Amino acid sequence: MAPSGHSENDSFDIAIIGGGPAGLFAGISAMEENSAARVVIFEHKSKVARKLLITGGGQCNLTNTLPMNRFVSHYGDASSTVRRVLYGFNNVALAEWFCAHGLKLVTRSDGKVFPHSFKSVDVLETLVKTFQKAGGSIKCRSEVGSVDYDDEANFCIVAGGETYRSGRLIVATGGITYPQTGSDGSAEKLFSGLFRRKNIETVPFESALTPLYPRDYAFDALAGVSLDAVEIHSSDTKNAVISSGGLLFRSDSLSGPAVLDASRYLSKGDRFEVNLVKSTAKSIDSFCEKFEQVARSSTKKTFTEVVHFASLPKRLVECLLKGWPGEEGITKSLARDLSKAEIRLLAGRLMRCPFVVETKGGANQGMVSSGGVPLSALDMKTMRASAIPGLYFCGEIVDVIGDTGGFNLQWAFSSARLAGKSAATSLGNDKDFRSDVYPVE
């Protein structure tokens, strides 16, 4: 991809490492804030934003239409800290920006927002065209080998064998998931020396929002069976609900939105339970009472009555009635013959189906990464490293994980918007600062 807007020069006002959506949007935001700013993106792959192209199976779920007071709750323990950043450029502002730049959007019934074409390439083309039209330069096949820094906020960057200088540096290199796309965690090593000098301790990267591989998995025959609404409870936190949503049984693992979200809170050896009938009853006692009333007056087989009462797939009910190693089966043919103990056993399997995490999906299965630069090291008013003037971070390299459903791309765009504008403003912009900040409720 050829540079656009400026002639070749080794000096830039703002340099950006990483050509993903966060890097592109940070550059766009910087030039919107200061049209005279000379901005360059260094991307070590042959094309920018390869990971964006596979986001959401290539459909690219950009954000979610939840009201912001509920939206910000989808970032776990980081919710209160990232609140200011998300309100500063929220989901409405993001949708308006893309629409203003010619990309039509569509909102599904579940609140997820996509490009109207459901093609991530259209999102990428909008970002690249806007960046280049504003005068930004993109240097692909330019892996950054070293970054030197002095106390006057001057950066010397060696990329693709060439040396460049920049007054401001934005790092948007992503995490470790799908490393073949360029998101390989390389920035952690690149900045390790500088971080040590400034006493910044990074959080090790791990794959996140990933399938779970349970120990002694007994549901291999259910591969392809899915449920629309389950609840996942953590056995280590007084059965607190840690996620809800869809679940997919795979031949060797569990996936689906509820599982991916739950994977943020679970590690090897952790026990968790799944309520497969979230909407049927509020407690095991309630389920037993309601099902017993139905069963006692029923002439149907146990299997048929459970399928009807719990609204579950037949293959799943067969598995639950049969049981698994170490568990007894429920063998009464007719529902009316079930004992109270058998009904309670059935209710337990339906509402507290137990699993133990053996392992989690790796770098080629996780949707995003946990770890990276901790929020405590950043000024959340600017996304600047508190101890390093002129150095900004945005996107997945920051230790923030949102739930599935558009929350992680929204974080990428919101944090990039703030980093780009802050970097441009710090250059000494003459015109009035044009803030996009929405009041925090």
Image: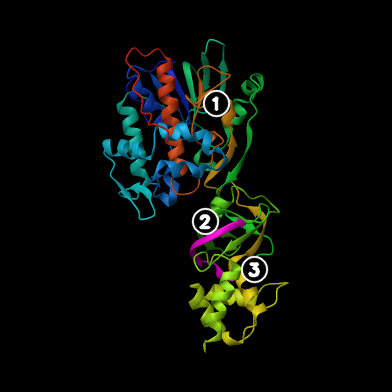
Instruction: Verify CB contact (< 8 Å) between mark 2 and mark 3.
Output: no
Q: Position of residue 341 (x, y in %)?
A: 67, 78
Q: Position of residue 80 (x, y in %)?
A: 52, 36
Q: Quadrant of residue 129?
A: top left
The label number, if any, that marks residue 378 in the structure image: 1
Residue 401 within the magenta-colored segment of the rendering: no
Q: Earlier in the sequence, mark 2 or mark 1?
A: 2
Q: Residue furthest top?
A: 152
Q: Which residue is mark 3?
A: 218
Q: Residues within 10 Å of mark 3 (few under 14, many from 20)?
A: some
- Magenta-drawn segment: 221-233
Quick one: SS at disc 3? loop
Q: CA distance from mark 1 to mark 3?
A: 45 Å
Q: Earlier in the sequence, mark 1 or mark 3?
A: 3
- Please name the residue shown 31% across and 35% down the image: 97
**Kind of residue at badge 3:** Ala
**Kind of residue at badge 2:** Ser
